[in-house]
Image (cartoon, rainbow, N blue to C red):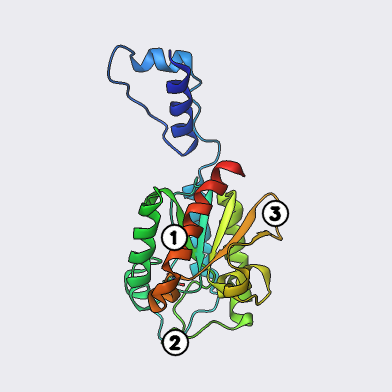
Amino acid sequence: MDTRFISTLKALMEIGFSELYVIGSSTTEEVSQEITLEKPTLDKRKMLEELYRKLEEERKCVLYEGASGYVFGEGNPYSPVVFVGEAPGEEEDQQKRPFVGRAGRYLNQKLEEVGLKREEVYITNVVKSRPPGNRKPSAKEMQSCLPYLRKEIDIIKPKLIVCLGSTALEGILGKNLPVTKYRGQLFDYPYDRSIKVFLTYHPAYVLRNPYSDKEFTEDMRRIVNLLSSL
Ligand code: URA
């Protein structure tokens, strides 16, 4: 069997496919004989579901008055890249999904422009509930949610964390670094140095400042390149 075909099948299994049907001359049995049909060793979806349950149960991560509950991360838990935003907004709070409002739609469009699909990556926030009036979460509020974000990242174990805006970076590194100066830079993730952290604009910032669209697109291209080199 073609080795490139086999490595494609292996890659599919690595991201969670456990049953493969091959149309053509090879039967499933033939395929299983030639490649080891291993199920992914970790059921990351289940681990994330458990973490979400814990978040709901413990209520240690700030749950703002007026918020309708927590908004957890979503997407492919086997993704090599995790996008991290600041906190859910109004639409996210209503739908209980991250980045589904105007900024989210813009992010989806940019992902597609560089050949990534939203459902192929993982998207989450530092703070898991909507701050009143969409204000910036305080350092203490971000600290209260950090253990859950750290665990989320621990389960996914991506190659790269993309911080959407300086608040997301502050939530992860505990440092306030202006995005205009530090955008495009790579940092070490302090809790696992095999993971790199990349800073770019928050999509809402780009929508408010359309002249930064070009740089945001460049950053997205850079992310794709980094994924193949890291
Ligand atoms: N802005 C964020 O930072 N996160 C969301 O989920 C939506 C908007």
- Dot 3 falls on a residue whose secondary structure is loop
Q: Amino acid at mark 2?
A: Pro
The one nearer the camera, 185 or 138, is: 185
Q: CA distance from mark 2 to mark 1?
A: 30 Å
Residue furthest to the left in view is 24
Percent position of residue 173, x then y: 67, 68
The crowd level at tag 3 (other Cα within 10 Å; few <14, some 14-19, many 20+) is few
Tag shown at residue 120 = none
Which sits earlier in the primary sequence, circle 2 or circle 3? 2
Q: Is mark 2 within 8 Å of ligand 1?
A: no
Which residue matches tag 1? 217
Quadrant in the picture for the C terminus: top right
| First-in-chain label (3 vs 1) | 3
* Circle 3: residue type: Asp
Residue 91 visible in rendering: yes
- Most foreground residue, 172 or 33: 172
Disc 2: which residue: 132
In this orientation, does residue 60 appear?
A: no
Percent coordinates x, y for residue 148 in the rendering: 58, 64
Which residue in the structure is indicated by mark 3?
192
Q: Secondary structure at mark 1?
A: helix
Residue 177 placement (x, y as % from top left): 65, 75
* Relative to 221, residue 40 above or below: above
Q: Position of residue 87 (x, y in %)?
A: 48, 74
Residue type, mark 1 in image: Thr
Please report contact status of discs 3 and 1: CB closer than 8 Å, yes or no: no
Circle 2 SS class: helix
Q: Please name whichever residue, 105 or 93, is drawn nearer the observer in this view of the structure.
A: 105
